[in-house]
Image (tube, rainbow, N blue to C red):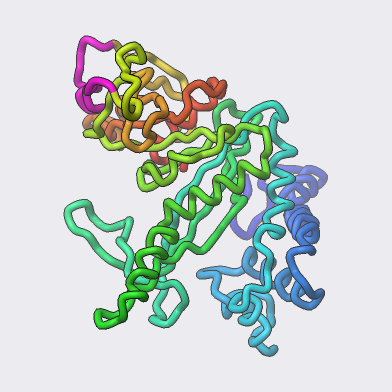
Amino acid sequence: MAYRGQGAVGLKASERAAFHAEKKTSGIADAFGNLFSKARSAFAQGRTYQKARSLAFSAIAGLGRRTVSGMLCAGAMQFEDWSGAYRLFERERIDRKALFAPVMQEALAGLDPDGPLVVMMDDTLVRKRGKKVHGTAWKRDPLGPPFHTNFVWGQRFLQLSVALPDKGCPGRARSIPIDFIHAPSAAKPKKNAPEPEWEEYSRQREAMKVSAVGASRLKELSIQMKDRKVLCALDGGFTNRTVFRGMPRNVALIGRIRKDAKLFSVPDSGKTSNRGRQRMYGDRLPTPEQWRQDESIDWTAVEAFGAGKLHQFDVKVMPAVRWAGTGNQTVQVVVVRPLAYRPRKGAKLLYRDPAYLTLHRPGHAFGRTATGISVAMGDRTQL
């Protein structure tokens, strides 16, 4: 066993040399350098590329917040001119699509060519202090207590990550970011602003919603994947008609749905009239919460990875329903019973909250992958 400041205890000299050789991390720096060199086309000039490469290595080796000044100090560039580093970010001298292209290529190389591309999308909030930082606004604090809404000043970003399966542990996956975009809210005009400004604000507010930005990123990803199927896991903030309606045919979505969501059956085609528009919804169905409490419906056991190991989850599936978020598209609703756990030995048996998920386009042949991602969304610790 090795202690801080000591060598490998109880090993011979030859064995200690092999022990220290395994701890060397020079291969990580070389691999990152080779990957970053493939993104050379993202920079118009050579000096811009060299500046970005130095800052990228400093971001990995630095401690604390990855600010521009922090990266300069970590790379021993604090006594040089800082203006070039700030211009690199403030004037958008980086092609974001070309920057993430090598990461996407390496991720696809480690996947089954005939299998679906499993991605996860969510927004994140980066706290800021300056009131004049571009795109900052008061946002709801996701870490605030449920009984009181707190607000923080920060920037909102949207991230897409691809799930790379772990070959050593079935069901486990590592998320690799493939897209990261700033998603600010529209700037609200003053009260005495003219009417055209308010009309432009209404238009921008709809176009700059985080759900609208996420839908556009998924559509662009589907174009890149061509005929390959894409399975995306979403949080409840993206489970709405803006994202679910109008998705390409090769994209299927899994998202959290409200427990009191209004669900309907598929309308009977034999009862539709030739006059007027076709019916989208049939009879009213129980809500997901009522479906969970119905003891006449049996639970089905499925195996999925969550919280570090494989678990047996109990689920109930509503096979074919209609929901306002998807319109005339038939979806499945999956209710996941929470797992029981003990915070410590001998403690009281506790339970998490149940999960209510909707599977968009259940006809896609995603198989067990869809079930595993659904349970991972319900566990809320894997994403």
With respect to residue 59, does 336 lie above or below? above
Q: Quadrant of residue 266?
A: top left
294 in magenta: yes
Locate residue 246 relative to residue 250 in the image: left or right: left
Q: Nearer the viewer, residue 268 or 346?
A: 268
- How many numbered circles are shown? 0
Tell me which residue sits at (57%, 80%) in the image. Answer: 69
Q: Quadrant of the N terminus?
A: top right
The x and y percentages for residue 340 are: 30, 27
Tell me which residue sits at (47%, 23%) in the image. Answer: 362
Q: Nearer the viewer, residue 254 or 204?
A: 204
The x and y percentages for residue 112 are: 70, 29
Q: Quadrant of residue 43?
A: bottom right
Asked whether the viewer can see residue 336, the reply is no
- Residue range in magenta is 282-297
Locate residue 363 relative to residue 116 in the image: left or right: left
Q: Quadrant of residue 175?
A: top right
Asked whether the viewer can see residue 150, the reply is yes
Tell me which residue sits at (32%, 31%) in the image. Answer: 323
Q: Nearer the viewer, residue 365 or 245?
A: 245
The x and y percentages for residue 93 are: 68, 73
With respect to residue 236, does 203 lie above or below? below
The x and y percentages for residue 294 are: 20, 17
Which residue is at the far left? 147
Tell me which residue sits at (51%, 39%) in the image. Answer: 247
